[in-house]
Amino acid sequence: MHWLARLVANGLPVPPGFVVLPGMFASGGEGRHSRLSPQARHSIETAYGELGRRAGQRDVVVAVRSSGSLEDGTVASFAGQYSTFLNVRGIADVLDKVEDCIRSLSNEGISSYRNRVTPRDPSDNDEPRMAVLVQIMVASDVAGVAFTADPISGDTSAVVLNSAPGLGTAVVDGTSVCDRWWVDRATFHIVRHEPGQTTPTGYTITPSEIVNISRLAVQAESAIGQFADVEWAIGDGVCWLLQARPITALPSQAPVPDDSPVKTGVSKNEPPRRSTSTFPFAWPDEDASTLHWRREGRAGDPPLRPMEASERESFLRSARNSASILGSPPPRRMIHLNGYRFSTATESDVPESVRDGHRTTFDRALEAIQATGRTYWDAVLFPEIDSGNCRIEAIKTQSLSNEELSEYLKSVFTWHERLWTLHSFVLRSVRFQQNTFREQLSRHLIAHATSDQSEHIEVMLSHVPTKTTQAIDAITELAAMLQERPGLAELVLSTPDDPGRNTTPETRHIVDRFKSRLEELLTTHSLRADAGAFTVGDYCQPGWRDRPELVFELIRRYVPQDLQSIPLRKNQAVEARDTLTASVRACIPDAESASRFDLLVDAARREVQAYENHNYHVDAAASALLWRCRSACGARLASMGVIASLDDVVWLHRHEIEAFLCHSGSNQITATELVAGRKAIHDWASRLDVPEWLGVPPEPTTTATPTGSGQVSSLPAPANVLMVGQPGSRGTATGRVRLVPPKATVPMVEPGDVLVARNAGALWAPIFPLATAVILDEGALFQHAMLICREFRVPGVIQTRHATARLHEGQIVTVDGTNGWVLPGPE
């Protein structure tokens, strides 16, 4: 068990649990120390109850494992000699299994094995002792054993893994003919695979999971200081280490090689990691090699192109600006290596007393505005943001000279930086402060209502008109126009540049109304773009005015739908909200407190509105305006012959674009070879084995059960549950799975579809009222997609981790958004 403790101390993923120490047993029964004392039984009951609370289950399923004092040594492992019990549920069963484990210490066969492999001096009074480990049971999809050296050949250059579907017992006890994998320790590339004699069914382990297990095994080896035999399991997409012990009887016991932490970036007896053949790079300075750098972004993200790197630098400057004003901790320091971003924590060079002063100044201004019943967004932020967006949007780039276009590029980047600085103020004022109107409303109800009504706040603050719901209303209206005549939708939507080109005189009046309403939508939502948190695509996206075909794709998804049901569901939800709000108000007895309730509800709803609308006015606007500027510069450089096409502008840095624009004339320099070279380097970098971190190892962290940002259900999941996530939008619905590709611009959706995606940015939000339900691998309760689902009563489940991998196209499922469950649909 001490080996497992070392894994926990090094921050490795070990299932939560507790230990029953040898001193907690009393003598009696068939063997020594075979009965639990009353005090021990009470302690175990308490620990098991706490473990259940951590897991969100009353009678959590656990594994009860023996751990003898001589077990897992370097000479003998005692593997399989003592008792282990899986799938134990309930305190009575746990207590019984703990006593069974201790009895196995006195088993005759084990005594013989112990005397044979660890002979003892007769005068030695140190009798073998037994502890018992109780851990949350990992409901594994696949499990096995990893050896950091080949236990048969003694080869220390590769990690050897055995894997089989289901529980790891099938591997360790030899009942399964398992797959075997060999992974090179130096590169973590799979060099050999021997499939088992039978083809596994159900879960199939992926190469990336094999590599991840190998890296964890090498870290476990580093933790225990010896070649390691590591038991592992994967459940719900999370890899857990169940046990680690030294490999016994290894041929030619060589020292542990120094290359063990290749993945983590540092060898035990070497200076911090430098360049390698799989990821060559140079540190920007000497001090950088002494820091821990983690990779930013999602696994599988391509390296940044030069213009994208310039955009990310603008984000980082805005983070520094807002941290200075708000008195927040400074943002992480960022470096770019081969186009990939790595960051490290930094300490503020501003004294804490000064930062406290900045925080106090901002909070006082915020409180003064809130005291008038106004939100910080309405009083301060929106006027500046709306004015700046209109100013930049009004510029006609076609009429600018090259020098003026260069200055325009500078001004757009300056405004981009300012918008993202203000973005931090938005979040601070409407979410991340202790005196939001929502919090004030909660405190007011506790103080003045005759009974606790705080649980109703979520519903009372829902269904507030926002920019997104306005866009949905307009798209619904446009689609309804095209439903008036059969075949009209196809004629209009096939020519987005001129919607009325193919129409007949009989339909001209409909098309004229359509074009007028469309122009109104494109004017009021010109900067709507797929930008902000949870966006899956590129950083910089066009707005609807610059790419109206995005709107046409949305309308195309709406035309086949029952459009009358969309406003009907919304109106029913608003009516239910207002009825509930009135009933809560009736619980406040005095008129003055009831009037204050009205004010707080109105202000809190405006906070909700500000949070949703900021995505359009800040996130989307910053993206759309920068995209428009970037495209204008690309078109100008292409017309000058500097680059081959306007799309090639992304291969230039911002300062290079400015220089090329200002260097026009007879001696014009071209960038075609520079662009071609950068494309080749980008292609090379895309194939690199990018480490998750570089430099010195991370500080050990406390192991915890992985969770997302929402609330999990307090009820135990049904036995037939397909997937457990977190509630995103309440309700239950059954439909067929529609898998959404990560790069989809606008998801396909038909009546009865359950949309399943990795995540969802703001651009997809108008699609969700059409879905029967939504399931996301990632996501958060407060993201725009889930807000829209709740507005239109579409059940949603988030943080499923692997829905896109485990559900298949057309599969019938029932989505329980109230509990966060995905269940099989009716056959």
Image (spheres, rainbow, N blue to C red):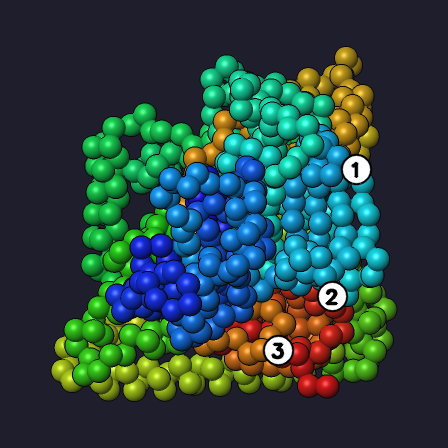
Q: Badges 1 and 3: C-beta atoms under 8 Å apart?
A: no
Pointer 3 and pointer 2: residues touching (CB < 8 Å)? no
Give the structural element (helix, strand or loop) at label 3.
Answer: loop
Determine whether label 2 and label 1 are within 8 Å by CB: no
- CA–CA distance in space, label 3 to label 2: 15 Å
Above or below: residue 564 compared with residue 418: below
Instruction: Please give left or right for residue 806 compared with residue 47 in the image.
Output: right
Report the amino acid beneath label 3: Asn
Mark identifier at residue 191: 1
Q: Nearer the viewer, residue 572 or 25?
A: 25
Q: Earlier in the sequence, mark 3 or mark 2?
A: 2
Residue beneath the point at 35% across and 37% down:
329
Q: Residue 81, percent across and down?
A: 56, 55
Find residue 458 and report its horizontal and vertical position in percent.
Answer: 38, 72
Residue type marked 2: Gly
Mark 2 secondary-structure assignment: loop
The residue located at (55%, 85%) in the rendering is: 568
Question: In this orientation, which residue lies closer to the viewer: 706 or 427?
Answer: 706
Label 1: state its secondary structure: strand
Point out the frontmost of discs 1 and 3: 1
Per the model, the C-alpha gap separating discs 1 and 3 is: 38 Å
Mark 2 vs 1, N-terminal side: 1
Q: Which residue position holds label 2?
A: 202
User: How many neighbours does mark 1 have within 10 angstroms: few (below 14), some (14-19), or many (20 or more)?
Assistant: few
Task: Count residues near mark 2 (Cα–Cα under 10 Å), then give few for <14, some for 14-19, many for 20+.
Answer: few
Q: Position of residue 748 (x, y in %)?
A: 73, 67
Q: Which mark is residue 720?
A: 3
Looking at the picture, which amino acid does disc 1 mark?
A: Val
